[in-house]
Amino acid sequence: MDEIVRFNKESEEFYIPLSFRGKETFKQSSGVILAGDIGGTKTNLALFHFEENTLKPIKKESFKTNDWSSFLELMATFHSKDLPVIDSICLGVAGPVIDGKVLGTNFSWELDEKKIANALKVERVSIINDMEANAYGLSVLAKKDLVEIKDGTWNRGNAAMISPGTGLGEVGLYWDGTHYHPFASEGGHCDFSQRTELDLRLWRFLQKKYGHVSWERIVSGPGIVNIYEFLLEDKKVAEPESLKNKLNGGDPAAAISKCAMDESFEICKEAMQLFNIYLATEAAQMALKFKALGGIFIGGGILPKIIDMVDKDLFLHHFIQSDKMNTLLEKIPVNVIMNDESPLFGAAFGAARNLPKK
Amino acid sequence: MDEIVRFNKESEEFYIPLSFRGKETFKQSSGVILAGDIGGTKTNLALFHFEENTLKPIKKESFKTNDWSSFLELMATFHSKDLPVIDSICLGVAGPVIDGKVLGTNFSWELDEKKIANALKVERVSIINDMEANAYGLSVLAKKDLVEIKDGTWNRGNAAMISPGTGLGEVGLYWDGTHYHPFASEGGHCDFSQRTELDLRLWRFLQKKYGHVSWERIVSGPGIVNIYEFLLEDKKVAEPESLKNKLNGGDPAAAISKCAMDESFEICKEAMQLFNIYLATEAAQMALKFKALGGIFIGGGILPKIIDMVDKDLFLHHFIQSDKMNTLLEKIPVNVIMNDESPLFGAAFGAARNLPKK
């Protein structure tokens, strides 16, 4: 691992001026940083030397979250004695962070800034929402890291990010006139809204299963499986035996999208089209709620893998469907983030923000 | 008119620390201010002496917007020669403000900062969205101006405001750790989301009428009428002749809520109950999208008039209905703003923000 990551500059092709809680430059900061991107499936940890707006990697490793009973247990393995002393830690965690504490939304870790600081003897520990780390990660992206799926012009105004993965992460970016301030959102847990009779039947199917139907039940990896299972029932179609085995394997959502790509089973293709439609619909809800004239960014691990399959016309058609705000929605660019390490780098800049001045 | 209004202070019972685009105190400002709250139905204008965080009224008047063909025509009547010269103007207008210009959403006035500045010979003129003025108005409220309809504790975090009126206004308040920054939202135009089979039938009824069903079609004055008309059709009930006449009068939503209060026609009562349920549902969507731990405020002209009829248990039940975020929603206080002049005072502080230093 030898890649060096820099904080983006106004002179670069893609530039989204981020504010890290009032800190807009890191020129005077240096030190050793631990960054974490902690989700229900995967935990990425990285140790960096930070200097002059630049992250120089020391050690980086990916873990299966559920193989460990706590973050501190994992740290005992990751941070061996030969590694340098850590000056600042920032962890992006998939869960609602309140007063420096969080309980993972789809995993059982409890994290607490103070307890981690005491246990690891590191003064500066900050826990942020994983989606906030996602947003901070925009600060390291280049144009090559983005694929535009709806065009638009960058306008002075808020932005937002939507990340389908194990769950559905969302984050807002407040525009103060010169910089963006990321803020946590739990919008993935908002109620699903229907536009067609098919949508109504999907809602009924999921309501029976879950009681309450949030966007996360549909626009996520498990959501792809939900849509697929609904279509099987709705169309009274039997699942091919060959697919059944693949679905019982490790990642049924990946199996469905792979099958949609090779077009071996029509239902899989339809499921992925519906996933695209619902992603567009919820992205539009965010665009309206946040008045996101600065654009919508799609993060998470799913879209980069299926990017060749995304029907841009279908996305566009379902993104621009409001009663009075189509002119607003037309202006808004939508881009997919192809760099899946950006949340980790985002957390790293979150840690850099707390470094003392040189 | 002799009431004096002060910018609220941390020592007071209710305190929401607002940032007026980076301005958090007005101690050094003084001058004569014109504030306006301009909507499709009503225009409130007020002239104040401003000094030491305090608004001292000179003249205040309410007009029917449609009685005048333009703001400048109205001003020729309002601002007579015996009144002092104006130093700063701020107008909160119901419409999308772009580059200092706005066309009213439900009325035909066009307002332009530069044209107003030239015509009135006032250097400092700013036009803001009416919902932004609503949010600024939080800075003058006292505890007596609020009615709590769901309890909770004030937590460090974003807040949001939802104002059912002619349309459905929404505004977010970004919390930077010490102050709130209001930002425009078009969330009232988000898709309606259903939770019951009755909701589905309401959706079908409105889809037939409008093509697209936004929250504004339901959680607003015209929305009350929509819900009522849906219930008549859904329950196959004939409308009493006496009510028919009242509904053909000036304000059918007011007639329905009045009828619900005296319980003369069951459908009106049910319509108002559904309005309450849908308000709670959409307030919860905002709470989740904005992660509004700082609270939800309900503005607009409807709630203060029906406050005695609001079933708090019903509101609570429908506010706390998510898949995984009930713990978050439980924490969030929801308050109705009973002072319908707060947007006018909000605009006044918007004008004070632009006063030169003493």
Image: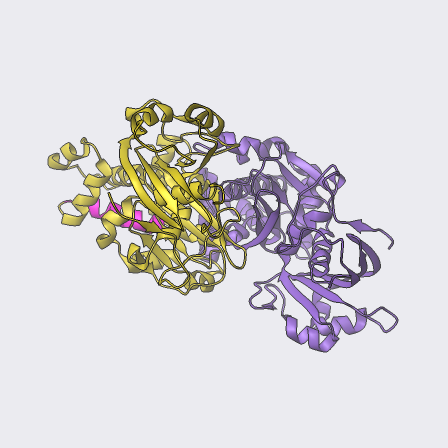
Chain colours: A yellow, B purple
Q: Residue furthest front?
A: A358
Query: Does residue A133 appear in this view?
Result: yes
* Residue B55 shown left or right of residue A197 in the figure: right
Majority SS type along the magenta span: helix
The answer to which image quadrant residue B267 occupies is: top right
Q: Position of residue B231 (x, y in %)?
A: 54, 44
Task: Tell which of A177 and B290 is nearer to you.
Answer: A177
Check the picture and name the quadrant holding the C terminus of chain B. bottom right
User: How many labels sit on residues?
Assistant: 0
Check the picture and name the quadrant holding the N terminus of chain B. bottom right
Task: Tell which of B312 and B12 is nearer to you.
Answer: B12
Task: Identify the residue shown where x is 36% and y is 60%.
Answer: A14
Q: Position of residue A173 (x, y in %)?
A: 47, 50
Task: Identify the residue shown where x is 63% and y is 66%.
Answer: B107
Q: Position of residue A8 (x, y in %)?
A: 38, 56
Task: Identify the residue shown where x is 65% and y is 48%.
Answer: B18
Query: Does residue B244 appear in this view?
Result: no
Q: Magenta segment: does it hold B168? A: no
Residue A147's place in the image compared with A110, above or below, is below
Q: Residue furthest left?
A: A242
Which residues are drawn in magenta? A265-281
* Residue A104 shown left or right of residue B97 in the figure: left
Q: Position of residue B290 (x, y in %)?
A: 51, 44
* Residue B43 shown left or right of residue B269 in the figure: right
Task: Identify the residue shown where x is 32% and y is 59%.
Answer: A143
Task: Tell which of A164 and A202 is nearer to you.
Answer: A164
